[in-house]
Image (cartoon, rainbow, N blue to C red):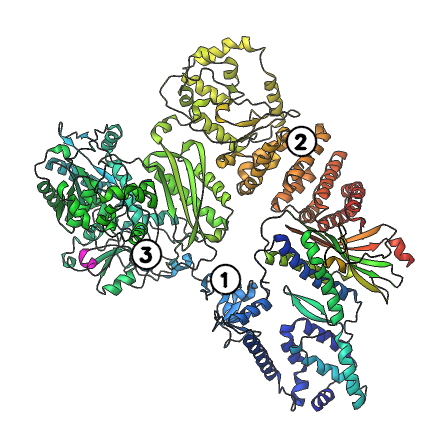
């Protein structure tokens, strides 16, 4: 929370936004259930996990022998935890990826956006889910506008409270989304207003142009949450392919 | 592992493991209740089997857990190397959602040496942190908090920012804090003694504001009626040194200084008259026992739970005193407040006194000062009563003569009441005015304190200081005279006085100082230098604490040292005026001469103590009372004012609870003022002005710690009163210069002769608005000097006269003695033909607006303004029969006459205004709108009127409406276009709902309500193309405004609309019409269409 005083309001907003995006993208991925979320138990914070283990063990005992049980226990311990663990961000319960690679992917991608966010070059950040044919099925889009001319300072707390509502809304928006087929994959894409010239900066090199198939048909938009304030204006909506296409699939 | 096995063996069911999992999940979702929930379910299971488990039962589990958490915390704290220990000894428990979050708070506690408890326990937790509490917890706060303070998280943040542990008291949760003794509770519970005690702290300043700390004093000679030929010089001085409560002899002092005994007799008579007057007023019938008389009985409250025995026999005034006493509950708080204030007594005394000497004041007004200020031989006598307040109190108690005695509001030794006056024995203990009683008691335990005895003060001498200039009196020995005066005073009042004689007022005052107590001193011009050399600087009038400290820094302690410094460097250091004052005073130079009464420049009232508001209502109520008080004062002084200033003390963000009970503490001072063209003392006008002013502050009323209302640019009411609400004054004023009077459709335009009053205002004449009506009335009565006669009949414009409203006409007719009717009759034939187009338009308009409460004659006419001299920029526009005049001036002072919302400005007019001007108007409008909403009733008629005009427009030419819509939407937001709904009842309904909802400019919040009320309306008649079109237009505009930044809002609106469309034909039409447009707009912006399920 401690930020440098000399940052521009855009810079402040961008750093809050990056934090938020990291959490929000994780939340989207969790929501879509791309990764196992623990079929037995949701993940637990360490201090409070003890009671559950008891239940868990009753169940196991009557199914298996003692040695088998020990083996299975170890196995299930891993699986049961799922890919995410509960954390708190801005006082909302959110999920955090347990797997370091997944966590790193999200973190690195979003952090890589930071310089561009500050400059206001990023138009939208999308979390795209593809089927096995690399056809996008669903896109979660964060459309951003960072007002470059905004002068006064940003109240970080206010911004956070606004962003918090996104997370709250997202957690109850499952019904708006479509069920994904198995074996889908996902990625984070950023739409830039103008392409950063490769080679000019180190950050720009991280970004590669995507060549995913786009929808031919008109798409449908389902807004989830909008926030318009200065200097940051953020809209969060889902894009689906039109119904005809989805019926084909 | 064994333990686990045994656990599982005790399980009753395993088939419904799924269900159990659900339970577990639920538990998990709410971690806080986890332990409890689990224990209740599985206690039986675990308790029997847990022999070997680390936890024998739930409580031991919890104990273990909190122990572990504590260890975790400790290790983290030691890891973070807590160098800072602001919060050492503080242990917080965070309850519920907070900003910053509990995790952050935990981090702070880690960092700054505090403790953080995850689970509440009475033993370890010292503070509960939360931002909000449910009602149930508030109701049973003790059960919830176990008596621990419930504090807002900002306490921690602020403490960290201040780098010290701040008092948590100001940060108490409001919901809880409201249980704390507020003023109301305080007054009902505590004894009257106590309440008085608190009142002592009242800081109020009521005296006429005198800008210089020392007024110019002129000289005046008055022929006393009873002693023809003998010159009596009445010398007055009003010294208004500062508003500081602690300065003892702050305010107005006066004494009659007679030359002969005859005059003293007169004075006595007057005093008698005074007291009888007092008696009449107060029905005290002379039973004024100074000791037991309680002057401030109006404060002593016969409370509802009458637990307080009256400690003092109450005077009759008590009977009339009010039930309770606070800004919150006492309807007469303001009144009681001032009844009980010493400074108010002193401050208003002069006003009262002047009224009693009407001849004197007229003499003063006409007095030609033959000022002899440069006269070297002038002799000024200064007489000052010795510790006046005390001496009056103890004059009937000879036993107390040598005892330390002080006067204050209360003799409660614990109280924070301030001592207002102490006698000399008391002063020898180091007791000073302005001290807290408890401090004084510490210095002198046997100090006797008395409450004020205002009536006795009036009866005795009324006030305690006077200057006399007897330069011309050819008195041989001024000392002899002084002693005779003192003797006289003592005999009359049984109070001692001191006198000082000097070459000017300054020296006389300094002389008195050395003469005290009960002595006299004459500083001859030769001795001035010697005397001053040794004088400490703070003895000079006008040098207060701050200035003294500054001087001390320069090692200036005595006047002698001060004299070493050159005038220039003094002025550089302390500013022109102060520097010069210092320079002069240190040399004993004082050119002020005795006598001229300072005309007060402003009158007002401040209440800076005990002001706490819960909500806007409280505040408004209080302001109404304040207005009454101020209005009374204005009437009392016989003046009216034009400029109104509202001062507000706002609690500083980081201010602690003030040391003084219910005091104002550390405050920001804010003020706003407004000037109106015609002086007034009318309560209602005042109230309205004040309401507007309050609106300007945009302040949370809970933050207000003090309010003051001041009226300045005073004018004598006598002249204006006679002329009030008559045209005569206007007609007659300066008619020589105004050859041709402009009447246009009953609206009077003023030429530059009223520039003095309207020098700086901008206004928009919005048709029929009550503002404007006021304005007109005011304008009419603006008058310069009401001396000359009305202009001759022949100069009047017949046509104008004929078109005057009937009341105005009859009044004019009266002025001309009935000749006007004939005159009109004669002229009628002539001007028949010249009846203007505007006239017919006017008739037209009136027909249309028959149902409106205000059928102002002007709305549909072009208005010509002659006020070029006033640099008014004005815009004339006419669009489709309606026209409004927008007059604007860069001076914001007058922007209260702007219309209450954008809707009152004709859009077509606005269009024609130059861009920069338009920008300024628009900029001013929103600010104004907010405050106007407070007084909506006053504006409503105007708005309706305007709307009806708008209807005509819109019906006649929809194109214009669209255009107007465009314009207003660009310019503002919802309010502006909401006002376009007026031609059908259903849409008007929408608008009403919108207005009710509080103008939050979100359509989605208005629509559901609309639907619920929609069915009450008869829709079949309502659906015609026009309505649908307008609704569509509205939605289109809304989409355009919102699509880019707030697609969610659009989405919600249209989903609502779709839902309505099922139920209502009207909305289905609207929806069908607008939907393609919406999708196109979304496609443009987002490259897709909105998904409507």
Residue with the mark numbered 2: B951
Provide the secondary structure element on which disc 1 rests: helix
Q: Is residue B519 visible?
A: yes
**Residue A243 placement (x, y as % from top left):** 87, 54
**Residue B883 placement (x, y as % from top left):** 61, 26
Residue with the mark numbered 3: B196
Work out whether disc 1 and disc 3 sit on a shared chain. Answer: yes
Which callout, 1 or 2, points at the residue further toward the start of the chain?
A: 1
Crowd band around label 3 with a 10 angstrom C-alpha radius: few (<14), some (14–19), many (20+): many
Provide the secondary structure element on which disc 3 rests: helix
The label number, if any, that marks residue B1002 in the structure image: none
Q: Which residues are magenta?
A: B420-430
- Tell me the distance, in whole angstroms, between the alpha carbons under discs 1 and 2: 58 Å
- Tell me the distance, in whole angstroms, between the alpha carbons under discs 1 and 3: 38 Å
**Which residue does the image show at 53% across and 10% down from the upper left?**
B828
Residue with the mark numbered 1: B161
Provide the secondary structure element on which disc 2 rests: helix
- Chain under numbered label 1: B
Q: Is residue B849 above or below residue B24?
A: above
């Amino acid at each position: 929370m401690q930020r440098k005083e000399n940052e521009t309001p855009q810079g402040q907003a961008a750093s809050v936004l990056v934090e938020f995006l990291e959490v929000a993208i994780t939340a989207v991925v969790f929501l879509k259930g791309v990764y196992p979320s623990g079929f037995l138990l949701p993940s637990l914070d360490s201090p409070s996990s003890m009671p559950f283990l008891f239940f868990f063990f009753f169940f196991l005992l009557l199914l298996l022998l003692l040695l088998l049980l020990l083996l299975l226990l170890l196995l299930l311990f891993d699986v049961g935890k799922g890919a995410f663990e509960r954390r708190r961000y801005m006082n909302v319960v959110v999920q955090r990826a347990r797997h370091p690679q997944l966590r790193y992917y999200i973190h690195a991608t979003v952090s890589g956006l930071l310089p561009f966010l500050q400059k206001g070059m990023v138009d939208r950040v999308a979390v795209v889910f593809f089927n096995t044919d690399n056809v996008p099925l669903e896109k979660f889009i964060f459309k951003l506008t960072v007002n470059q001319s905004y002068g006064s300072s940003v109240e970080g707390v206010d911004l956070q409270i606004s962003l918090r509502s996104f997370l709250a809304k997202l957690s109850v928006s499952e019904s708006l989304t479509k069920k994904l087929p198995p074996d889908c994959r996902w990625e984070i894409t950023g739409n830039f207003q103008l392409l950063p010239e490769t080679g000019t900066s180190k950050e720009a090199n991280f970004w590669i142009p995507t060549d995913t198939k786009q929808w031919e048909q008109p798409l449908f938009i389902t807004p989830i949450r909008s926030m318009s304030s200065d200097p940051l204006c953020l809209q969060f909506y889902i894009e689906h392919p039109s119904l005809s296409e989805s019926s084909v699939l | 592992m064994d333990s686990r096995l045994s656990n599982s063996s005790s399980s009753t069911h395993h088939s419904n493991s799924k269900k159990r999992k659900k339970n577990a999940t639920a538990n998990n979702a709410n971690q806080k209740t986890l332990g409890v929930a689990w224990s209740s379910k599985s206690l039986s299971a675990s308790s029997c089997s847990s022999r070997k488990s680390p936890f024998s039962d739930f409580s031991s589990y919890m104990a273990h857990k909190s122990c572990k958490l504590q260890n975790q915390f400790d290790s983290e704290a030691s890891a973070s190397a807590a160098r800072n220990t602001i919060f050492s000894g503080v242990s917080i428990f965070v309850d519920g959602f907070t900003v910053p979050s509990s995790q952050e708070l935990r981090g702070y506690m880690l960092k700054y040496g505090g403790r953080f408890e995850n689970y509440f326990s009475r033993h370890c937790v010292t503070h509960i942190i939360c931002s909000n509490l449910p009602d149930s917890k508030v109701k049973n706060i003790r059960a919830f908090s176990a008596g621990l303070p419930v504090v807002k998280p900002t306490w921690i943040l602020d403490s960290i920012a201040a780098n010290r542990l701040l008092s948590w008291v100001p940060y108490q949760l409001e919901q809880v804090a409201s249980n704390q003794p507020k003023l109301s509770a305080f007054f009902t519970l505590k004894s009257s003694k106590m309440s008085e005690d608190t009142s002592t702290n009242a800081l109020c300043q009521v005296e006429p504001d005198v800008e210089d700390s020392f007024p110019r004093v002129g000289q005046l000679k008055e022929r006393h009626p009873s002693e023809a030929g003998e010159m009596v010089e009445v010398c007055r001085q009003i010294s208004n040194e500062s508003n500081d409560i602690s300065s003892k002899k702050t305010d107005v002092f006066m004494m009659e200084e007679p030359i002969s005994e005859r005059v003293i007799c007169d004075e006595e008579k007057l005093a008698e008259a005074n007291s009888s007057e007092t008696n009449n007023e107060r029905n005290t019938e002379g039973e004024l026992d100074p000791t037991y008389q309680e002057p401030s009985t109006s404060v002593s409250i016969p409370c509802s739970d009458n637990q307080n025995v009256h400690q003092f026999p109450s005077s009759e005034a008590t009977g009339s005193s009010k039930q309770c006493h606070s800004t919150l509950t006492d309807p007469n708080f303001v009144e009681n407040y001032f009844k009980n204030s010493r400074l108010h007594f002193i401050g208003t005394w002069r006003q009262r006194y002047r009224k009693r000497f009407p001849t004197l004041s007229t003499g003063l007004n006409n007095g030609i000062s033959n000022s002899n200020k440069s006269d070297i031989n002038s002799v000024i006598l200064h007489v000052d009563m010795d510790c006046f307040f005390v001496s009056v109190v103890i004059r009937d108690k000879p036993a107390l003569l040598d005892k330390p005695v002080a006067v204050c509001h209360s003799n409660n030794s614990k109280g924070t009441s301030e001592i207002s006056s102490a006698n000399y024995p008391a002063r020898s203990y180091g007791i000073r005015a302005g001290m807290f009683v408890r401090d004084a008691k510490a210095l002198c335990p046997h100090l006797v304190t008395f409450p004020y005895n205002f009536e006795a003060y009036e009866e005795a001498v009324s006030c305690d200081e006077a200057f006399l200039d007897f330069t011309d009196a050819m008195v041989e020995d001024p000392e002899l005279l002084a002693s005779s005066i003192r003797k006289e005073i003592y005999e009359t009042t049984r109070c001692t006085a001191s006198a000082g004689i000097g070459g000017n007022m300054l020296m006389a005052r300094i002389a008195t100082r050395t003469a005290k107590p009960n002595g006299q001193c004459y500083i001859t011009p030769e001795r001035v230098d010697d005397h001053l050399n040794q004088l400490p600087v703070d003895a000079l009038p006008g040098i207060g604490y701050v200035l003294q400290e500054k001087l001390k820094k320069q090692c200036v302690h005595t006047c002698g040292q001060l004299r070493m410094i050159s005038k220039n460097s003094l002025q550089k250091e302390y500013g022109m005026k102060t520097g010069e004052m210092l320079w002069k005073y240190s040399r004993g130079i004082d050119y002020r001469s005795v006598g001229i009464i300072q005309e007060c420049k402003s009158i007002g009232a401040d209440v800076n103590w005990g002001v706490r508001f819960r909500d806007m209502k409280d505040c408004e109520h209080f302001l109404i009372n304040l207005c009454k008080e101020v209005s009374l004062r204005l009437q009392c002084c016989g003046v009216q004012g034009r400029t109104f200033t509202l001062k507000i003390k706002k609690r500083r963000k980081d201010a602690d609870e003030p040391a003084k009970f219910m005091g104002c503490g550390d405050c920001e001072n804010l003020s706003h003022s407004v000037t109106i063209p015609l002086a007034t003392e009318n309560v209602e006008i005042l109230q309205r002005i004040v309401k507007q002013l309050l609106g300007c502050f945009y302040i949370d009323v809970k933050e207000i710690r003090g309010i003051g209302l001041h009226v300045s640019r005073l004018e004598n009411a006598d002249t204006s009163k006679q002329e009030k609400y008559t045209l005569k004054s206007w007609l007659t004023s300066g008619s020589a210069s105004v050859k041709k009077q402009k009447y246009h459709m009953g609206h009077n335009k003023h030429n530059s002769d009223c520039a003095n009053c309207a020098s700086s205002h901008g206004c928009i004449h919005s048709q029929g608005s009550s503002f404007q009506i006021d304005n007109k009335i005011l304008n009419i009565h603006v008058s310069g000097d009401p001396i000359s006669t009305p202009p001759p009949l022949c100069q009047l414009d017949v046509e104008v006269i004929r078109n005057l409203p009937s009341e105005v006409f009859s009044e004019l007719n009266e002025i001309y003695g009935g000749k006007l009717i004939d005159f009109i009759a004669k002229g009628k034939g002539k001007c028949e033909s010249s009846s203007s187009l505007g006239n017919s338009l006017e008739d037209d308009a009136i027909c249309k607006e028959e149902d409106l409460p205000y059928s102002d004659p002007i709305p549909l006419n072009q208005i010509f303004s002659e006020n070029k001299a006033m640099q008014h920029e004005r815009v004339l526009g006419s669009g489709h029969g309606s026209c409004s005049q927008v007059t604007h001036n860069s001076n914001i002072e007058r922007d209260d006459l702007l219309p209450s919302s954008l809707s009152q400005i004709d859009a077509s007019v606005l269009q024609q205004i130059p861009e920069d001007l338009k920008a300024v108007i628009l900029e001013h409008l929103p600010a104004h709108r907010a405050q106007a909403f407070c007084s909506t009733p006053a504006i409503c008629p105007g708005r309706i009127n305007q709307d009806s005009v708008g209807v005509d427009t819109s019906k006649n030419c929809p194109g214009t409406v669209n255009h107007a819509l465009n314009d207003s939407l660009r310019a503002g937001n919802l309010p502006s276009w909401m006002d376009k709904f007026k031609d059908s009842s259903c849409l008007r309904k929408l608008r009403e709902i919108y207005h009710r909802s509080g103008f939050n400019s979100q359509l989605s919040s208005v629509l559901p309500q609309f639907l619920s009320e929609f069915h009450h309306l008869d829709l079949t008649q309502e659906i015609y193309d026009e309505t649908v079109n307008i609704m569509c237009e509205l939605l289109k505009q809304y989409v355009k405004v919102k699509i880019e930044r707030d697609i969610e809002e659009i989405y919600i609106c249209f989903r609502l609309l779709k839902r309505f469309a099922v139920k209502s034909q009207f909305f289905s039409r609207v929806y069908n019409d607008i939907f393609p447009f919406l999708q196109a707009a979304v496609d443009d912006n987002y490259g897709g269409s909105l998904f409507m399920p």
